[in-house]
Every structure is written in structure tokens, then in C-alpha cells.
Image: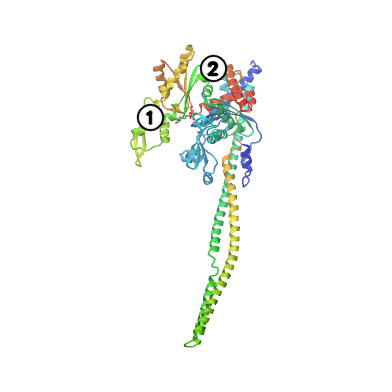
């Protein structure tokens, strides 16, 4: 931040008055950040809430830089201009690529680390902190991420905040919703489905299961089905992802899903209702199987309570009818179950992290400065 | 007669007020709609209902009163008035802040326009200088050095040849072959001399011109280079200004002081334990980072 301010002063003509000024004022800005594989969300105590795809691009050469007029592009903007960019999606299955095997891929590790740092810093920048405020941030990251990975995240945030902590992502969701006792949180992301058992203390390894039958898996499944069933149609995996995000459902279809794909250059309509239903539904059995495992290893007295307190979140939970489908499958396989979908899946993690930041006692922040 | 709550109870209520304030703030924020006149016009909206700030003030006062009632907090009329007054002041200061933010945005836009103009002027200048440079280069490359002297040389050679012919004619019908050969060799020698002399003269002229041309082109090239550097700086400044945005000074948090869990929070001791654990985990990481 200091650097940015210093360089802005060199501008011609004089740009000193760009910063305006509100006079001196103090305050504490709390930030909750959900650093996701496919998108990152931020919620701040100044009311800012934002999310963007967790991608960053750097202009390939001087000409692109001049054309794009930026050193770094994030989110959708980076996707749109990706051909003129060195493009990074630095997180994979929730962790920074190569952060655990940096010794074998030093260059990739460094590039991905830089990209992840830039994404974290962009998230903080988008929260519009004021220079005269204390900034305290809690960053939610996957429960299973390694110590190297956690260090990398803290290092990236540190230059822009006064104090920073990280916490497990599913825990943040539960904390945000005040559901800390005897409940199961399912977070369906792009790369992973994280299941976490809450029982009044911080969850540990035994309380968590990670599956890879998440959003990306559904996209690939649907892509393969359509390749087989829509002969001659041209589409990319990215197009299929958008189709899923728009029409994804399980159970009864409200309307048939009809899309247009070009066939030999000519837009042609295809009814893909069944393919969409089957692909989305593929997430259900592994989730219920994992729920069963988490329930079975829990105190028998509270197993029923656990099954009847399942919280469904994450971007992937927006598939229409998913909570009901998981509930039905739980009844079939586990005898009972009650599943509640969180209201705002995109912000549930960030809002929870914000709440943790708010509740964290002052002396803890002080000690981590 | 009202029973005054204890100081610590008051403190804890104050913090729950913060979360009430946060809720109200969020509600208003989520339900308010940002738009401008042009887009309203495009949507065919001709009339909109607006709140006056004093109406909004009384709405906030009403909401606060209602929430206090729900929470079972009983306050005297004086306290209520103070609270409303405080709320009103906070609201006005928010309005002021919004105005100064608007001003900041306008300033920023003006600055950006200035920078863009500066960049465009520079671009125009560079284009003009580039054209001049090209013309100049062309001029010096195609400079007709020696063209005039070449014609002069041809004329001299013709004179020499004609002279030789008339001299041979003057020697009569059967001239001495040796004399004719001598004359011819002499004229040939003169031709060669002439060639050498002329090309030396042309070369000398050419190099004089070339030195002058190079100097001119060098000066022009330096000028263009300087302008390009200026343009680079202008574009960098513009880029930085765009990246910094008008929000360099940010949006104020709703908290003026550090918060933290309070004893009246639901599940206080459970949450306290969990927060401590999170802190401890982070402390361990920090210790390992060193
Ligand atoms: N409306 C929607 N319907 C169905 N799926 C959706 C919808 N919107 C987003 N998704 C899917 O949600 C997934 C991303 O979810 P989310 O943003 O929670 O993931 P993440 O936190 O980035 O990933 P991870 O938890 O693996 O790190 C993607 O697979 C995306 O396609």
C-alpha cells in the first residue's frame, strides 16, 4: 500500500489531489475473506461485500500492457482478456498450487504463490479500507491445507492488514450462522466438497471429510454426456459450466432445459434436461455416504441430532432441489435427515469469517501483529 | 421510577447495540438501490418517491425505539432523546461523508480526464514528429547530389570529343596514323582524369551532405524518443490513477473501536473457547514463520 501511494505521486501532471481526504479519523475495519478455488469473496465491516473469480493475469508483453492499461487483471476481466495474459488460477482443491512441493517445481511454486498473494491483496483492496483504520482480517481456507499453505496465505495478507488470522472454511460458515453444536456442514465448492462435523469445539481432522465430486466434477460429467448425446454440437467445458450454473437441478424439472449449440456453425436447439439432472444428481450419493461415515463415528446418543442438522452451502449448493435430494437420500440410506440450504452460499464463508474477526478479543489481535 | 441498570450491564448492552446498529445499517444498505437519472429515464420512470433526511431521521429513531422495546431495554425519555440525537448526528455525518466522497470521485474523474488529455496531446505530437522524421529521412536519402555535375561532365566529354574530331579533320585527308593515335590517347587520358576528378568532387559533396543529414535526423530522433518517454510516463500515471481509483481513502468501518465477544453474547463461553483455539493455532503458525 505504501508503495502504491509513493508511486502515485510521481505521476504527470501532478496527481496529488487524487486522494482527496476526509480528515483524520480512527476506526477498526474487520474483514472476512473466503479464499476459494473458483472464487473469492470478501465481507467487511464497512458494508462492502464482493466476490470475484480467483484468477489473475499479467500482460504477456509491453504491447499488451499498453493495450490493457493494467499490470494485473482479476476475475472476469482476466478471463475475458486471457489470450494477452500470463494467466493463473493459483488455487487447486483449495490450496495454492505447488505450495507443498516448492522444492520440485520452484518456478511454478513461486509464480502461483505470487498469483495467490495478488488475489488476496485484490480482495483486501476491494474492501476499500481507509488508511487511518486498523484492519483485522480472518481468512477462511480449506480445513486440510498444510502449514506451508497457511503461512503463504498469511504472508500475502500481512503487508495490507494490521493483523491476520486464518481459520477452517466450514467452521467459518457454521460460526457465521451460530450453529456450533451437533451439526454437519457441507460446503460444495468447485474442486472439493468439504464435510465438517461441529460439536461445540473447533473441528479436528477426524471431524472432516473432503470429496472431489464437486462442481468441476459435475461439469466434466455433463460435458462427457453431452458429447455423447448431442451429436455434432460444438461447446467447451466453460460453456457447460455456465449451463450448469444457469439450469442445474435435481429432482423434478420445472421446465425442460433447452440450449442452443452450434452444429457446423448453425445454432441448433438441444433438450438436455436428463443430462443436467443426472450429472447434478451424481453429487448426492458420495455426500450421503460421507455424512453416514461422520455420523457413525459420533456419540450414538447424538447421532440423530446430527442427522437432523445438516447445513448445505458453497457455490455448488445452488443446484436447484439439491437440499431436498440429499434429504431424501439420507432418509433412504440413514433412516432420517434434515437438510437446510444456507441463504447466501456465496457469502456464507466470508460472513462467518467476518463474524469471527468481530468476536476475536483485542488482545489476540495485538499478539499477532 | 426507572431502575438504572448496572454499569457492566450497560456496557454489554452497548455492544449489543453495536450489533443492532450493524443490522440496521445492513438492512438499509441491502434494501437501498443505487441508480442515476439517465437510467431512470431510460426505464421510463418520471417520478420517484424520496425521503427527506428528517423523515429518515425519525424512521431511524422509530426503528431504534422498536428494537429497544424488543430487547426489553427500558430507557428514560431523556436517554431516548439523547440516543435519537446521537443517531441523527451520526446520520448527518454519514451524509457529509457521502458528499465528500462524491466530491472525491468528481475530482478523481477530472484528474483522470486531465491525464488522458495530456496523453492524447503527447500522442498527437509524436505522430507529427514521426511524419517529419520520415520526410526528412527521405529527403536526405534521395538528395540529388552530383546530378548537375554529371551533366556538366558529359558536356565536357562531348567538347573534348568534338575537339579531337575537328583536330583530326584539320590534319587533312590522309593524316599521319601515329599522330591520330597520339591525339586519341591524349583525349582518352583526359576522359579518365575527368572521371576521377568528378567522382572525387561528388563524393566529397555527398559526405558533407550526409553529415548534415545525419545530424538533423539524430536531433529529430532524440526529440521523438523524449516524447515517447513522456508518453510512457503519462500512460503509467493514468494506469496508476485508474488502479488506485477514487477510493484511495476508502469507506469507513461502522466500528470506531476494537470489538470482541461480550459476556452477553449467546454461547459466550463456548465461543470464547473456540476463538482462543483459533488464536492459538495462528500463534503457532506465527511462531513457526518466525
Ligand atoms: N447457480 C449455480 N448452480 C450450480 N452451481 C453453481 C452455481 N453457481 C456457482 N456454482 C458452482 O459452484 C462452484 C464454486 O463454488 P464456490 O464458489 O463455493 O467454490 P470455491 O470456494 O471457489 O471452491 P473450493 O471450495 O473448492 O475452494 C463451481 O463449480 C460453480 O460452477
**Quick check: A339 left or right of B221?**
left
Q: What residue does disc 2 label?
A: A200
Q: Position of residue A114 (x, y in %)?
A: 55, 35
Q: Residues within 10 Å of mark 2 (few under 14, many from 20)?
A: some
Q: Position of residue A322 (x, y in %)?
A: 42, 24
Q: Indicate whether B273 appears above or below A116.
A: above
Q: Residue furthest top?
A: A301
- Figure quadrant of residue B238: top right
Which quadrant holds the N terminus of chain B? top right
The residue depicted at 55 percent of the width and 61 percent of the height is B136
Asked whether residue B25 appears in the rendered view, the answer is no
Q: Residue furthest bottom?
A: B172
Which chain's residue wears label 1? A
Q: Indicate whether A224 appears above or below B284.
A: below
> What secondary structure is marked by label 1?
helix
Which quadrant holds the C terminus of chain B? top right
Asked whether residue B184 appears in the rendered view, the answer is yes
Instruction: Tell me: is circle 1 under 8 Å from ligand 1.
Output: no
Do the residues at discs 1 and 2 belong to one chain?
A: yes
The residue depicted at 49 percent of the width and 82 percent of the height is B165
**Quick check: A167 left or right of A221?**
right
Of residue A83 and residue A268, the one placed in the foreground of this image is A83
Count all numbered tags in the image, as a single digit: 2
**Chain-order first, disc 1 or disc 2:** 2
**Quick check: B92 left or right of A218?**
right
Badge number at residue A173 = none
Of residue B18 and residue A230, the one placed in the foreground of this image is A230
Question: CA–CA distance between discs 1 and 2?
Answer: 38 Å
Q: What residue does disc 1 label?
A: A276
Of residue B208 and residue A227, the one placed in the foreground of this image is B208
Amino acid at each position: 500500500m505504501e508503495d502504491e501511494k509513493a508511486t502515485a505521486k510521481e505521476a504527470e501532471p501532478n496527481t496529488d489531489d487524487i486522494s482527496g481526504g476526509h480528515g483524520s479519523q480512527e476506526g477498526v475495519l474487520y474483514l472476512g475473506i473466503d479464499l476459494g478455488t473458483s472464487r473469492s469473496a470478501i465481507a467487511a465491516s464497512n458494508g462492502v461485500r464482493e466476490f470475484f473469480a480467483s484468477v489473475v493475469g499479467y500482460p504477456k508483453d509491453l504491447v499488451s500492457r499498453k493495450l490493457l492499461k493494467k499490470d494485473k487483471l482479476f476475475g472476469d476481466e482476466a478471463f475475458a482478456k486471457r489470450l494477452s495474459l500470463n494467466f493463473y488460477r493459483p488455487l487447486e482443491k483449495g490450496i495454492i498450487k505447488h505450495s507443498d512441493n516448492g522444492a520440485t517445481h520452484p518456478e511454478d511454486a513461486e509464480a502461483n504463490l505470487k498469483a495467490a498473494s495478488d488475489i488476496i491483496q485484490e480482495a483486501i483492496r476491494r474492501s476499500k479500507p481507509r488508511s487511518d483504520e486498523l484492519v483485522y482480517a480472518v481468512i477462511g481456507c480449506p480445513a486440510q491445507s498444510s502449514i506451508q499453505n497457511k503461512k503463504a496465505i498469511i504472508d500475502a495478507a500481512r503487508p495490507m492488514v494490521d493483523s491476520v488470522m486464518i481459520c477452517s472454511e466450514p467452521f467459518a460458515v457454521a460460526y457465521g450462522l451460530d450453529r456450533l453444536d451437533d451439526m454437519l456442514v457441507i460446503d460444495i465448492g468447485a474442486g472439493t466438497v468439504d464435510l465438517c462435523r461441529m460439536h461445540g469445539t473447533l473441528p479436528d481432522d477426524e471431524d472432516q471429510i473432503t470429496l472431489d465430486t464437486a462442481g468441476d466434477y459435475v461439469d466434466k460429467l455433463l460435458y462427457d454426456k453431452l458429447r455423447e448425446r448431442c451429436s455434432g454440437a460444438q461447446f467447451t467445458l466453460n460453456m457447460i459450466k455456465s449451463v450448469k450454473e444457469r439450469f442445474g437441478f435435481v429432482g423434478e424439472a420445472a421446465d425442460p432445459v433447452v440450449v442452443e449449440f452450434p452444429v457446423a456453425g448453425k445454432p441448433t436447439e438441444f433438450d438436455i434436461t436428463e443430462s443436467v439432472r443426472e450429472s447434478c444428481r451424481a453429487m448426492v450419493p458420495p455426500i450421503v455416504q460421507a455424512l453416514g461415515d461422520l455420523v457413525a463415528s459420533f456419540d450414538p446418543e447424538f447421532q440423530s441430532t446430527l442427522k437432523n442438522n445438516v447445513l448445505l452451502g458453497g457455490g455448488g449448493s445452488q443446484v436447484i432441489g439439491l437440499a431436498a435430494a440429499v434429504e431424501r437420500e439420507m432418509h433412504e440410506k440413514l433412516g432420517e435427515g434434515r437438510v437446510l440450504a444456507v441463504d447466501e452460499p456465496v457469502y456464507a464463508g466470508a460472513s462467518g469469517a467476518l463474524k469471527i474477526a468481530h468476536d476475536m478479543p483485542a488482545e489476540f489481535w495485538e499478539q499477532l501483529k | 421510577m426507572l431502575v438504572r441498570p448496572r454499569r457492566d450491564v450497560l456496557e454489554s448492552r452497548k455492544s449489543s447495540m453495536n450489533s443492532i446498529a450493524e443490522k440496521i445499517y445492513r438492512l438499509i444498505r441491502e434494501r437501498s438501490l443505487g441508480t442515476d437519472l439517465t437510467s431512470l429515464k431510460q426505464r421510463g420512470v418520471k417520478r420517484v418517491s424520496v425521503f427527506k433526511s428528517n423523515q429518515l431521521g425519525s424512521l431511524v429513531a422509530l426503528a431504534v425505539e422498536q428494537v429497544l422495546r424488543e430487547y426489553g431495554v427500558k430507557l428514560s425519555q431523556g436517554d431516548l432523546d439523547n440516543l435519537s440525537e446521537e443517531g441523527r448526528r451520526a446520520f448527518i455525518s454519514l451524509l457529509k461523508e457521502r458528499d465528500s466522497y462524491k466530491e472525491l470521485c468528481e475530482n478523481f474523474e477530472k484528474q483522470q480526464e486531465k491525464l488522458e488529455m495530456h496523453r492524447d496531446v503527447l500522442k498527437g505530437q509524436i505522430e507529427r514528429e514521426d511524419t517529419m522524421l520520415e520526410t526528412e529521412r527521405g529527403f536526405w536519402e534521395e538528395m540529388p547530389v552530383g546530378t548537375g555535375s554529371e551533366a556538366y561532365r558529359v558536356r565536357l566529354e562531348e567538347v573534348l570529343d568534338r575537339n579531337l574530331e575537328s583536330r583530326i579533320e584539320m590534319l587533312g585527308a590522309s593524316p599521319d596514323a601515329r599522330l591520330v593515335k597520339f591525339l586519341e590517347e591524349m583525349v582518352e587520358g583526359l576522359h579518365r582524369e575527368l572521371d576521377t576528378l568528378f567522382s572525387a568532387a561528388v563524393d566529397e559533396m555527398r559526405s558533407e551532405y550526409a553529415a548534415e543529414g545525419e545530424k538533423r535526423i539524430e536531433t529529430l530522433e532524440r526529440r521523438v524518443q523524449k516524447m515517447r518517454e513522456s508518453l510512457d510516463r503519462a500512460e503509467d500515471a493514468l494506469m496508476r490513477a485508474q488502479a488506485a481509483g477514487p477510493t484511495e481513502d476508502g469507506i469507513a468501518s461502522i466500528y470506531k473501536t476494537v470489538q470482541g465477544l461480550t459476556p452477553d453474547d449467546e454461547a459466550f463461553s463456548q465461543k470464547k473457547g473456540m476463538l482462543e483455539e483459533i488464536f492459538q493455532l495462528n500463534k503457532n503458525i506465527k511462531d513457526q514463520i518466525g
